[in-house]
Amino acid sequence: MADVEPSVEPEEAKPARALLEEILTKMGLDDVEIVYIARSEGEYFEVRGPLLASLIGREGKTLEALNLIYNNIINAGVRNNRRYYTIDAEGYRARRADQLKTLALATLERVVRENKPVKLDPMLPSERKIVHLALADSPFVRTESEGVEPERRLVVFPKAE
């Protein structure tokens, strides 16, 4: 995904970029490039450079936590027109989103074939959201989250006839 072409960065995104640069510098990651990418699911700041494993963290948890804090800072005190950005590192989250969309479709097929609910493995809130959205318009299944973090998981149910 690192070969994804950057989009033209809107003027409104510049303060958000500056905040991300400041945070990354304080994390010791100043040898990086940040590119803005507009995707169908939202606005991304992709961090590119060496030694990004510490930014991603195990199973993307550091990236997820940073993203939560980052968006809370950006939207502090904002009532209308909140903006949310997804911070990615070398396309990690974009690749994971593609994997989750594939999982969602495979699960849909299994639920329809077996006509019984399927519980997915626990996943991060942002990952559950991707699966929920991937199946939201399906006439065949519905989704619900169950359990408590960090064991919260998504369940795909067949829709009643």
Image (cartoon, rainbow, N blue to C red):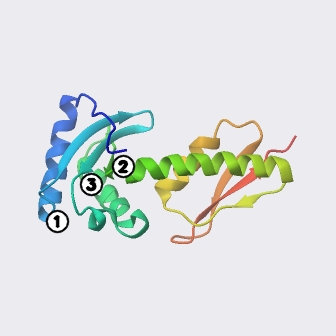
Label 3 crowd (10 A; few <14 / some 14-19 / many >=20):
many
Residue located beneath label 3 in the image:
70
3D distance between C-alphas at marks 2 and 1: 19 Å
Secondary structure state at the residue bearing disc 2: loop
Residue located beneath label 1 in the image:
27
- Image marks 3 and 2: residues in contact by CB distance under 8 Å: no
Q: Nearer the viewer, mark 3 or mark 2?
A: 2
Q: Residue flagged by tag 3: what amino acid is it? A: Tyr
- Nearer-N-terminus badge (2/1): 1
Say the numbered circle drawn on residue 104. Answer: none
- Residue 42 lies in quadrant: top left
- Nearer-N-terminus badge (3/1): 1
Label 2 crowd (10 A; few <14 / some 14-19 / many >=20):
some
Q: Is residue 76 visible?
A: no
Residue located beneath label 2 in the image:
91
Q: Is residue 160 visible?
A: yes
Residue 99 spot, x, y in % from top left: 54, 51
Taking the spot 70% from the left edge, 51% from the top edge, the residue there is: 107
Give 54 or 131, whichever is nearer the viewer: 54
Secondary structure state at the residue bearing disc 3: helix
Q: 37 above or below 129?
A: above
